Image (cartoon, rainbow, N blue to C red):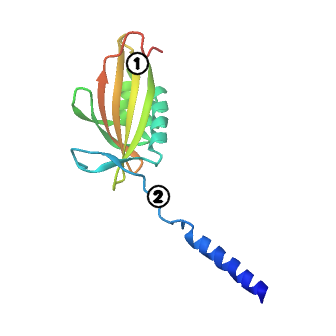
Amino acid sequence: MKYLSVLTGIIVSILMVAACQQQESSQPIETPSNGMAMTEEYGGDEFTIATSNEDEIFMEMAEAFNRMDAEALWSYSTDTVMMRNIEGMEIPLTQADMAGFFSSADSLNWDIDAVIPVKVTGSDQVRVLVDSREVIYMKDGNVIKKHLFEEFTFEDGKMVKVRQWDAAMADGAGSM
């Protein structure tokens, strides 16, 4: 009987400790949100750091761009990508447009300095914010040097929009 009381006490203690342990949830852990979209479709919505693979997709796209491979680049894009260029003009961009651009260049180099993927809370939209330097050697002899900040918008894992801002790049910076 004495051993039965001790055994019962041990079992009750184990059950109490187990009941106090934090239970694992089958629901995904929500990443805390921060920041806020102030305009456009998602005005007032918050952002979280995206935990999907758009940052990896973006880096594969950057490699395709540096290889001047329009087909590989467009495998991660919708048929037409809307682009707001550094002049503020919104233009539709297709794989054929990109292939034409690549054919007008001798070589190029796109150096990525930072990639920050953010998700609009409550949506499937991911925006990849990119700080980079780009040098393009055109076949006509021109050299284009840009320090860019860009926003690449992905929906369902495909790029749908690009927005660009640029800054002057110091001489010698970004050379290949």
Label 1 amino acid? Val
Observer-nearest residue: 133 or 79?
133
Where disc 1 sits, the SS reads: strand
Q: Earlier in the sequence, mark 1 or mark 2?
A: 2
| Residue drawn at 39 percent across, 14 percent down | 139
Observer-nearest residue: 1 or 22?
1
| Residue 18: numbered disc | none
Residue 14 placement, left or right of 129: right
Q: Position of residue 143 (x, y in %)?
A: 37, 13
Q: Which residue is mark 1?
A: 135
| Residue drawn at 46 percent across, 58 percent down | 29
Residue 97 visible in the snapshot = no
Give above or below for 32 relative to 130.
below
* Res 107 → quadrant: top left
Q: Position of residue 16 (x, y in %)?
A: 60, 75
| Residue drawn at 47 percent across, 26 percent down | 66
Label 2 amino acid? Ile
| Residue drawn at 30 percent across, 30 percent down | 164
Q: Which residue is mark 2?
A: 29
Observer-nearest residue: 5 or 68?
5
Quarter containing the N terminus: bottom right
* Res 30 → quadrant: bottom left
Residue 40 placement, left or right of 68: left
